[in-house]
Amino acid sequence: MREKSRFTRAGALILSVFLLCLALALPSCSLPAQKKYTTVIDGPFDTMTQLVIYARKKGNADAFFARFENELRKWDRLADIYYEYDGMNNLRTLNLAAGGAPVELDPALLDLLEYGLAARSLGGGRIDLLLGPVLSLWHECRTAGLADPENARIPTDAELSAAAEIARRATLEIDRDAGTAFLPVPGSSVDVGAFAKGYATERISAELESLGYTDFAANVGGNLRVSGEAGKDPWTLSVRDPIAGGVVGRFGQSGKKALVTSGSYERYYTVDGVKYHHIVDPDTSFPAAFGWASISVLTDDAGLADVLSTALFCLDREAGVSLISGLSSPVSVLWIAENGERYGTGIFEGGGS
């Protein structure tokens, strides 16, 4: 009886495998084809976000869109340095409390601040989240100058010197056990504009991947993060050429990839015929003056790509190549100079042609 039972189980297993193979071979039993779904989110991080996902059911796509938008709006509020929100302590709350007492913050925001401290070394010292007083001066002058171009001005030397001195003395204390952050120096402030958007994009994308979502692309105001493939094909990535117009190169990429561009051609204002863009060199307290129109970074992490695209803008090409050569992650960079010349490494070798 035992022998017969054993052979019966074996025969049943073979039959089950046969029926499974037959079912997979029948068109009527195949899974529905993936369809492309898209949506646009307006507002978070003061920009437009475009989402694309290939899914078998519209309900899955809608759930992905809703989850991504909810998380993006949360990160936008947490990282906001201009406004506070009911029921939430954010970076505005932290900055207002400088020189006073520690502020209890969401663990995710503490993660962001710790990432910002680490970004100093990742960016070769060109990223400083405590440069807030200097960046705030430039923001105020740029905002006023765009509203009233005839009276546009740049910060005075005295204003910049005072702000830079506060930034130089500033420290950020994070207590994970207490769940707090503290700025001991009065007047000091954090500014995470150099990396917050990329960091948030990466965190949200990674979380959704852990939930089983794939084959999607998120373009958060120029911070592009892709996952999987565009249906059955690789994602096609390209870079805008701010000098000649159009795009530079078209590259097929699959899996987890991030492409971030920093440039001087969108966020700037003009004073006495001179353009002043928004990327400030921490060494000079002035907009970086290395002759770059844009710098694009392709790597596997949107947070790192955001950090590097900003940091490289504050370096000449030789120093930039040295910086990325010391990284453990594979990184491709495309430099586009104000005179139209292009230089590239990795996938952008040859200037992206």
Image: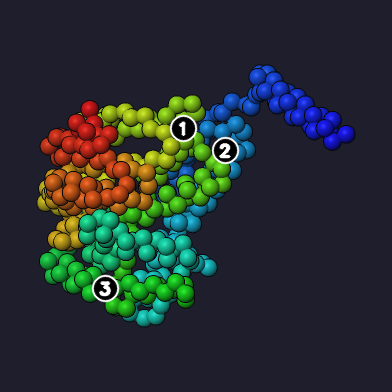
Residue beneath the point at 88% across and 34% down:
1
**Where's residue 24, x and y in %?**
66, 23
As drawn, 340 above or below 263 = above
Residue plotted at (21% across, 37% down) = 344
Residue positioned 25% across, 34% down in the render: 348
User: Residue 299 location in percent, x, y?
Assistant: 33, 43
Numbered mark located on residue 170 in the image: 3
Q: Is residue 25 left or right of residue 46?
A: right
**Cα distance in 3D space between marks 1 and 2:** 15 Å
- On screen, residue 285 versus residue 62, left or right, reads left
User: Which callout, 1 or 2, points at the residue further toward the start of the chain?
Assistant: 2
The amino acid sitting under disc 3 is Ala
Q: CA distance from mark 2 to mark 3?
A: 45 Å
Q: Is residue 204 above or below residue 109?
A: above
Which residue is the site of mark 2? 61
For the residue carrying disc 3, how many other residues have a C-alpha within 10 Å: few (<14), some (14-19), or many (20+)?
Answer: many
Of 265 and 57, nearer the camera is: 57
Q: Position of residue 158 (x, y in %)?
A: 13, 70
Above/below status of 33 relative to 101: above
SS assignment at label 2: helix
Residue 98 visible (yes or no): yes
Looking at the picture, tell me which residue is in the foreground, 313 or 19: 19
Check residue 229 in the rendering and tell me which mark sits there, or answer none.
1
Kindly state the secondary structure of the residue where label 3 is placed. loop
